[in-house]
Amino acid sequence: MRDVLPIAVLVLLVLGAGVVVTAAACLTIAGARQVRRRARRQSAEAPARPAHVPLQRRVVWLACHTLSCGHLRTPHYPAGPGYVMCDQCGAHRRDPS
């Protein structure tokens, strides 16, 4: 009976050490997975460089002579050589410049 107590304490110490080793291994694996996920997320969130940046279109503010625009000054954009197009109604007219 005297030998039972030291054996029980030894078993409990071995089991406790096993739990500590298992917990350390699990934390190491979880930490490595988190680092990989974070690196993958940051690389996915990195903005891609645009292949082509469109140039600003030249705008001309003119009075549009249509009934839908009512002679208001509206933006007109280039629509071919020598012509501009109304941004609101789509009417084409000669470029005044």
Image: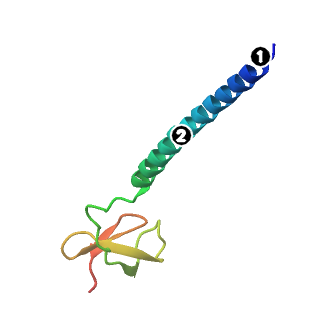
Compare residues 67 and 63 and report the one nearer the observer: 63
Q: Could you say where residue 10 lies in the image, as x and y percent from the top left?
A: 69, 25
Q: Residue at x 44, y 54 (%)?
A: 42
Left or right of residue 33: residue 80: left
Q: Residue at x 72, y 20 (%)?
A: 7
The residue sitting at the front extreme is: 2
Identify the element where label 2 is drawn: helix
Vertical placement of residue 42 versus 54, above or below:
above
Q: Could you say where residue 73 lies in the image, as x and y percent from the top left?
A: 45, 79
Q: Could you say where residue 62 lies in the image, as x and y percent from the top left?
A: 39, 80
Give residue 30's mark: 2
Q: What is the distance, in whole Å, between disc 1 and disc 2 at their CAs?
A: 39 Å
The residue sitting at the right extreme is: 1
Give residue 4's mark: 1
Q: Nearer the viewer, mark 1 or mark 2?
A: 1
Q: Amino acid at mark 2?
A: Ala
Compare residues 68 and 24 and report the one nearer the observer: 24
Vertical placement of residue 84 versus 40, above or below:
below
Vertical placement of residue 92 versus 14, above or below:
below
The image quadrant where one finds the N terminus is top right
Compare residues 94 and 57 and report the one nearer the observer: 57
Vertical placement of residue 39 versus 10, above or below:
below
